[in-house]
Image: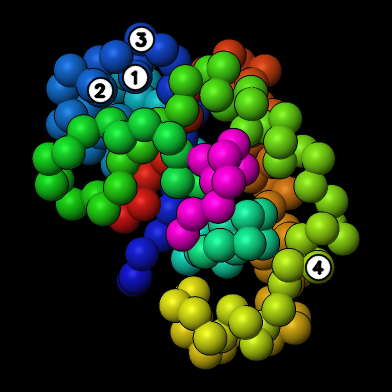
Amino acid sequence: MGIVATLHQVTLSQLKRIQEDHELIDQWIFYEDEDPKVMIDEGLYLGRSLYGLNFLITGDHLGGEPPESYAIFGKHLLFEEDWGVDICMYLMPNEVDEVCSAICKITKDDLLSQFDPDVMNSIPIYPPGGWIESDFDILYNKFKKMLAYYEDTVHNRNAMLNLVH
């Protein structure tokens, strides 16, 4: 399957509970607990587009300048234990707002100017060596969905879990 990313908005009380009991991630996010009182939203599945999206947003497939660099990979490490997720980061509601404000200023032309299949094929961005011109539309559609998800999270005044697994 490879490395994929998902974003999940959570209330502050849910975030606090996850910080106190990391196994709740499995129960709430990976739906091992079907109780609708505790489950969080299904999230936004970015799939394997995470590195390509981050590259278009920041010019770097793994990093970039904040706050844009927090959009996919988050800011704060949730916990360090190995539980099968490579990265489990989060953003507080004010940081979600900051990221949303930054990425909502990014235009389609901005993203298109960053999209360079030759450059992307020369660095380890999935699919390795397989980027073609038509892939921009896929990344742009993921970006629009991500932006809408951030806007919804801001509207709900929620925090954001940024999972790479």
CB within 8 Å, label 2 to label 3: no
| Labels 4 and 3 touching (C-beta < 8 A) | no
Q: Is residue 26 left or right of residue 118?
A: left
Q: Residues within 10 Å of mark 1 (few under 14, many from 20)?
A: many
What kind of element bears circle 3? Answer: helix
Residue bearing mark 2: 18
**What residue does disc 1 label?**
15
Tag 2 and tag 1, C-beta contact below 8 Å? yes
Mark 2: which secondary structure? Answer: helix
Q: Is residue 53 visible?
A: no
Q: Which residues are magenta?
A: 62-71
Residue found farthest to the top: 13
Secondary element at tag 1: helix
Q: CA distance from mark 2 to mark 3?
A: 9 Å
| Contact? badges 3 and 1 (CB < 8 Å) | yes
* Residue 23 position by quadrant: top left
Q: Quadrant of the C terminus?
A: bottom left
